[in-house]
Every structure is written in C-alpha cells, then in structure tokens.
C-alpha cells in the first residue's frame, strides 16, 4: 500500500508522537513519518524520533513569543517540500503558525488539543477544564487555521471527570484518549475524502452512511 509522507512538529515530551509511531507499525496505517521538527532544541520528542530511526531537526524559532520568525517558517516549508510531505501533524507544538505558512503548505495541517473544543482553547486546557468543574472533558483533533485552536473539527473523544480527580489525573486520562484519537484521525484525513463547509468538516463516508 502507498503510504503518505507526513511530518510531525512537536515542542515537548512527544507522547503523541510515540502513539503515532506505534500506529505506523501497522502496515495498513496509511502514513509514514518522514520527519520530526521541533522549535525546542532539547525537546524529548526529537529523541523519540531519533530512537525510532526517524530524521529529527531542531529549528531555531528565531523569535520569542508564540510565533516563529518568517525565516524559521521558510526553513520548515523548505524541509517539508524537500521530503514531499503531504500532511503536517502538530503534536504538542506550542507555537502559532502564520497565515502565510498555512497558505504555502498545500496539504492538511492537523493539531491535537486536550479539551473538547471550542471549550478551553489555549494553554493548560486540562487545568482550565478541571478548575471549571466540568463533568466531561476530552480531546479534539482539528484542522489548523490562523486562530488558536479554532479550525474545523476532525475528531473528538470524551472522558469522564471523576470526583476524586486532581488536575494531573484528569490530564493523564485525556492524554490516553489523545493517544487513541490522533492516529485514527490522521488515518481518516488521509484516506477518506472530506469537504469543509463553513466550520463543519464532513467526511464523504458520513454522507453515504446516511443513505
Ligand atoms: C498534549 O496534551 C497535546 O494535546 C497538548 O500538549 C500535549 C503534548 O504532549 N497540546 C496543546 O496543548 C496544543 N495547544 P506530548 O508532547 O506528550 O504529545
């Protein structure tokens, strides 16, 4: 089977990257992680990639704050083009990509966020949900647009908040859900045609399953 080349952008520990690499062991999973990039020189995610024999590059963000410099974005785009990357997967990537970056990359750009969006966008979504006192929390995979955690939703997974949870217990339960959700969402985006109508992303198979 033909596998699409995908790249993963990660800033941190790389547990979602690990779950993606685990999924890749199944020959029926439709993607091959060809490159892992990080804006953090010492991100453990780079080590996770190298241990798995995958090319891993730290990109100097060249700028403080939530965005990358345009030089850094150009470097990333060139690396993606050189490797014919079809889909870019953000896995714990803590910066915001510019409109011009998103227009320049032709394939889908996916992100995973540890809340049931549109609730609790931004930083420490798990803490926000815990402090808010929600009974159900979860994770969302969405297409990346120019906003922060605002793009069309691809997939969501809900988890129950238990009475004796603290913030970290809840975050761990959400993370386990993320690890199941992300590889499946990537599979779907790469194999099932979809359209985006306004905010709604509709997979064609959903259309046919109604008839
Ligand atoms: C994950 O919980 C991911 O959803 C979150 O960062 C964590 C990364 O963990 N991402 C965001 O909050 C993005 N807004 P990981 O490095 O172990 O995959």
Image (cartoon, helix red, strand yellow):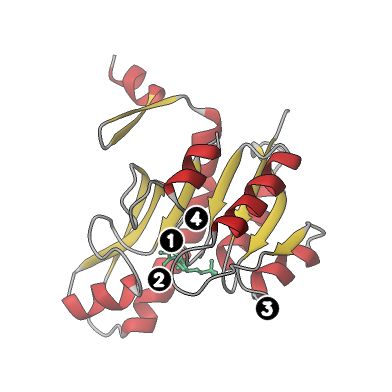
| Mark 3 lies on residue | 42
With respect to residue 29, does 40 lie above or below? Answer: below
Q: Is residue 20 at all visible to an observer of this figure?
A: yes
Q: Secondary structure at mark 3?
A: loop
Q: To which quarter of the image does residue 9 belong?
A: bottom right
- Going from the N terminus, do you reach mark 4 or mark 2 first? 2
Q: Tell me, yes or no, whether the two marked residues, 1 and 4, touch with CB atoms within 8 Å.
A: yes
In the rendered structure, the answer to whether residue 93 lies left or right of residue 30 reads left
- Mark 1 surroundings within 10 Å by alpha-carbon count, few (fewer than 14), some (14 through 19), many (20 or more): some
Separation (CA) of disc 4 from disc 3: 26 Å
Residue occupying image coordinates x 19% and y 69%: 135
| Mark 4 lies on residue | 180
Separation (CA) of disc 3 from disc 2: 26 Å
- Mark 3 surroundings within 10 Å by alpha-carbon count, few (fewer than 14), some (14 through 19), many (20 or more): few
The C terminus, quarter of image: top left
Q: Secondary structure at mark 4?
A: helix
In the rendered structure, the answer to whether residue 30 lies left or right of residue 158 reads right
Q: Tell me, yes or no, whether the two marked residues, 1 and 2, touch with CB atoms within 8 Å.
A: yes
Q: Tell me, yes or no, whether the two marked residues, 4 and 2, touch with CB atoms within 8 Å.
A: no
Separation (CA) of disc 3 from disc 1: 26 Å
With respect to residue 17, does 142 lie above or below? Answer: above
In front: label 3 or label 2: 3
- Going from the N terminus, do you reach mark 4 or mark 3 first? 3
| Mark 2 lies on residue | 173
Q: Residue 163: image x %, image y %?
A: 22, 81
The image's mark for residue 100 is none
Residue occupying image coordinates x 64% and y 39%: 29
Q: Residue 104: image x %, image y %?
A: 54, 38
- Going from the N terminus, do you reach mark 3 or mark 1 first? 3
């Amino acid at each position: 089977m033909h596998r699409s080349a995908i790249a993963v952008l990660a800033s941190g520990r790389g547990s979602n990257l690990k779950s993606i690499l685990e999924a890749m062991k199944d020959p029926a999973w439709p993607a091959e992680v060809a490159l892992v990039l990080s804006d953090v020189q010492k991100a453990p995610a780079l080590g996770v990639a190298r241990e798995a024999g995958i090319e891993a590059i730290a990109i100097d963000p060249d700028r403080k704050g939530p965005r990358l410099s345009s030089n850094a974005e150009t470097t990333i785009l060139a690396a993606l083009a050189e490797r014919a990357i079809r889909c870019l997967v953000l896995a714990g990537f803590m910066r915001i990509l510019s409109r011009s970056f998103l227009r320049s990359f032709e394939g889908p750009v996916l992100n995973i966020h540890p809340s049931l969006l549109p609730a609790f966008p931004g930083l420490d979504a798990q803490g926000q949900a815990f402090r808010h006192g929600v009974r159900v929390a979860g994770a969302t995979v969405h297409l990346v647009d120019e906003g922060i955690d605002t793009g069309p939703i691809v997939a969501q997974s809900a988890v129950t908040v238990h009475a004796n949870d603290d913030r970290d217990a809840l975050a761990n339960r959400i993370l386990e859900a993320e690890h199941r959700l992300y590889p499946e969402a990537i599979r779907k985006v790469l194999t099932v045609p979809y359209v985006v109508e306004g905010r709604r992303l509709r997979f064609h198979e959903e259309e046919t399953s109604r008839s």
